[in-house]
Amino acid sequence: MRDLTRAGVFDRVSFEVRGGEIVALAGLVGAGRSEVVRAVFGVDGYDSGEVFVAGKRLAKGRPAAAMAAGVALVPEDRRQQGLVMELSIERNATLTRRWSLSRLGLLGPRTEREDAYKWTRRLQVKAGHLSDPVSTLSGGNQQKVVLAKWLSTDPKVLIVDEPTRGIDVGTKAEVHRLMSQLAVEGVAVLMVSSELPEVLGMADRVLVMHEGRLVEEITRDRADEESVMLAATGQHSGDAA
């Protein structure tokens, strides 16, 4: 993306995420990280700038266009933004797949059930029955259902906003392994995280934001807690190019 700007929120933010790498957006609360990724996906608007996927410009403010281009967003608040709590595990796991295939008349009950089984099994969702309400699952298993929902679309770009917040250590490790495997398979992974160990352990590059601006890009070999925190608090060596 190039020079993405929204007045009072983020200013001239530019960066690239390549297939096969994990890039972390780091910074303090209020730095504008979640707002940037929501704008990229089209949930929120922006005033100026451009977003490209595989060389093609994305229409502004249109999540459907982002999905069609192969972009997926796992939001920060899974209960409010990622799941429909009163629906079943099966239905939640296939919501995005249902949207894309129903337009072509290709998704019936059997296909939906098979898709849900495939992805919840791959992500090892621990549930009694797929027909149970998703609200009956633990936080970690709910997050797996959100991931299943998006992975069923075979994304080129996976954006994850605080992917392991509020989940247990075991599930956190599973999510990390999944993200690493997706990168190996060629997916471009953009991760927003407030957990420094997660940022330092997962990212090939760390992009640090401060007060709405991208101020530092740190490669894996240079990234440590001190360098990230200095940039996040405005004590960086210089604005990122």
Image (cartoon, grey):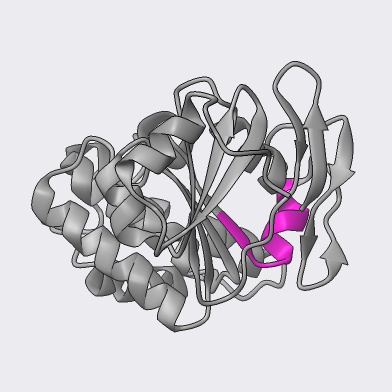
Q: In this rendering, is residue 225 above or below 66?
A: above
Of 17 and 34, which appears nearest the observer?
A: 17
Position in image of residue 121 (x %, y %): 23, 72
Of 77 and 179, which appears nearest the observer?
A: 179
Position in image of residue 38 (x %, y %): 63, 38
Position in image of residue 236 (x %, y %): 55, 34
Q: Residue furthest bottom?
A: 185
- Within the image, what quadrant is residue 97 found in? bottom right
Position in image of residue 52 (x %, y %): 80, 60
- In the rendered image, residue 5 lying in the magenta stretch gets the answer no
The residue drawn where x is 39% and y is 57% is 147
Q: In this rendering, is residue 145 above or below 43?
A: below
* Res. 93 visible in picture: no
Q: Residue furthest top?
A: 8
- In the rendered image, residue 65 lying in the magenta stretch gets the answer yes
Give the main secondary structure of the magenta stretch.
helix
64 sits left or right of 198 in the view: right
* Res. 230 visible in picture: yes
Of 219 and 110, which appears nearest the observer?
A: 219
The residue drawn where x is 76% and y is 53% is 1
What segment carries the magenta color? Answer: 63-72
Q: Residue furthest front?
A: 237
Q: In this rendering, is residue 76 above or below 120?
A: above
82 sits left or right of 66 in the view: left
